[in-house]
Amino acid sequence: MEFSEITQTQQKYDANQIQVLEGLEAVRKRPGMYIGSTGPRGLHHLVYEIVDNAIDEALAGFCDKIDVKILPGDVISVLDNGRGIPVGIQPKLGIPAVTVVYTVLHAGGKFGGGGYKVSGGLHGVGASVVNALSEWLEVEVFTEGKHYFQRFERGKIATPLELRGETDRTGTLVRFKPDAEIFQETTVYDYETLQTRLREQAFLNAGIHIELVDERDPNNRIQNNYCYHGGVSSFVEFINKKKAVEVIHPDIMHFTAVAPDDSATAEIAMQYNDSYNELMLSFANNIHTTDGGTHEDGFKRALTRVMNDYARKYNILKENDKNLSGEDVREGLTVIISVKLKEAQFEGQTKARLGNTEIGTLVSNMISDKLSTYLEENPATARAIFDKALAASRAREAARKARDLVRRKSALESASLPGKLADCQSRNPEETEIYIVEGDSAGGSAKCGRDRRFQAILPLWGKMLNVEKARLDKVYGNEKLMPVVTALGCGIGEEFDLSKLRYGKIIIMADADVDGSHIRTLLLTFFFRFMKPLVEEGHVYLAQPPLFRLTKAKNHYYAFSDRERDKLMAELGSNYEIQRYKGLGEMDAEQLWETTMNPATRTMLRVEVEDAAAADEAFTILMGDKVEPRKEFIEQNAKYVQNLDI
Ligand code: 1YM
């Protein structure tokens, strides 16, 4: 295609532009509809959208290198060595294809024909959305010996596509600056967030080189390069190394399959470790399906069946033994499931669940076929896995007995709620809260200070159990955790039932010192491992008691951080008294209500799980039994820790 055509079609181009601009105005008016949010998540999403186009080009077989840079001013640059976005005039609109890609809503890789779009961040809303939400965006295309350039501002064409000169390379370079008018919260990129996502993409697309560079600080250039020839196997290896668990068989199992009609592929890598936790990460078209779907269901179904069939065949399970359950055969399993398909259906509120039924069949047939063969051919690995699953099964049986015992006991005692619980009057979880408080004296203040209509108090006592090292059977009968379980009312593990939860907010209230942070970590680990939906659905909170009280002329002022204290000190000038709270117990009931418990004035932190893998890893390392990784983790994360009082 010749460049001169652009001038020839100028008139048509102007006429069409009106429609084009209207399209992108919609994106600027309601950005949330296109990128989810205008917070940090949406900001990072812009990068993924552009990178997705480069990954598509790699999957089509034309590109093997993607460079992402954070430049000074938080400008993002993405470069690939593919064919370059086509610059020929797109017949329908009469403007160059690359201009269409960046100015027409929903224009995605369907012009040049061939291949199918498999990636697609927030489901392929694409480059024009990034353009609409950028203060400016520049695209450079290197193709067929020529170098082209075009600039846009807030989605509008600033300069027409121009020929800049000759080149012997091919590819696409995009630079953009997110618009501070849209991203009002922040326009600063977080290196680690991009790193995690790009590394994940490198795992999911074996063989692609992805480079990430941070050039914002001239004195501290940061760079990471990712390329994994092992694909999802490398992902499993990476996770198990990072979790610092002992694997129970050396080889990672890796299975692939293609649908008979070529419309989809499935790839699974899995390995068992000596922990009690299962970590399953699933992806559809490189998008993390956090709510699972047909690919996960197909895997689980087939795994349970294959394991039981094998166990029966080789008499590992005797005639009278019960079948192994899904939980038994997944204990200690790290598994990555990645499927790629032509028309992915994403379901549910967050669109994070895969709905295509044919994918369930593809995955389940693949496991039935290939995993059974693998077990037949690797009897030593099979032995190790069955030892693990049988131990899990016995522990589950023991847990059931322990649970029944607890039930019988509480039936005898006829009081089903824990004795130390000061319950609230309301029975409506929409308004009720339970404060879990470490220490009897703080518990006392909280009981007096609370609003008994909707606030319940449960003081904790007794011996700490590290749940990371315990299975369910050890939790039943633990004097510290059982009162929590009974008070919440929703059961644990397999029996968990969110609809039975007695309090809408579960608030952990502990001192701002090392012991307090231990109890916080312990309870969070417990909720995460045994009542995960509580955390996922946002029911768990951390109370934020003040660290200082300043008193001047009988007025009290509270500070929740060193910075707030300094600010208050400056405001009050002189003649004030300052008191540092060492623990909750130092506050009387009224102070505790005023500062920490009164819904009108308190601040609390809601616990959220951003990234299941990262949360799992953090708990494994923090509460697991290896000392070195824990030390390392704490050193690496120490900069984030505030109010640490040793
Ligand atoms: C740094 C971002 O966008 N690379 C990129 C995009 C495209 C192509 C190559 C491409 C696709 C096709 C044919 C095709 C796109 N082209 C289009 C469209 N990197 C980046 N690299 N030739 C080149 O899909 O057939 C959309 S994306 F629509 F113009 F073809």
Image (tube, helix red, strand yellow):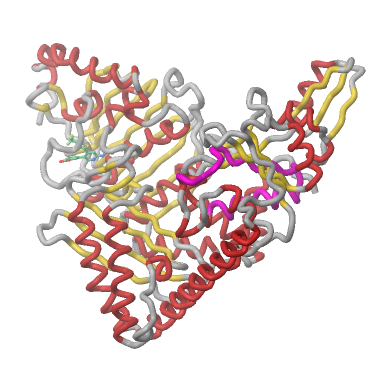
Please give the name of the residue rendered at 17% of the width and 34% of the height, measured from the top-left corner: 86
In this view of the protein, can residue 611 be seen by the observer?
A: no
Q: Residue at x 58, y 34 (%)?
A: 426
What are the residue bounds of the magenta stretch? 499-528
Q: Going by the image, does 54 lie left or right of 556?
A: left
The answer to whether residue 369 is above or below residue 586 is below
Q: Looking at the picture, tell me which residue is in the foreground, 365 or 523.
A: 523
Q: Is residue 514 magenta?
A: yes
**Residue 69 found in image quarter:** top left
- Count of marks, rendered view: 0
Q: Position of residue 288 (x, y in %)?
A: 36, 48
- The answer to whether residue 36 is magenta is no
Q: Which image quarter holds the N terminus? A: top left
Return the x and y of residue 278 as percentages of the image width and height: 45, 62
Left or right, 142 with reference to 387: left
Which residue does the image show at 28% across and 56% down from the upper left? Answer: 295
Q: Report whether residue 323 is seen.
A: yes
Whether residue 168 sits left or right of residue 132 in the image: it is left
Percent of width and height locating residue 497: 46, 50
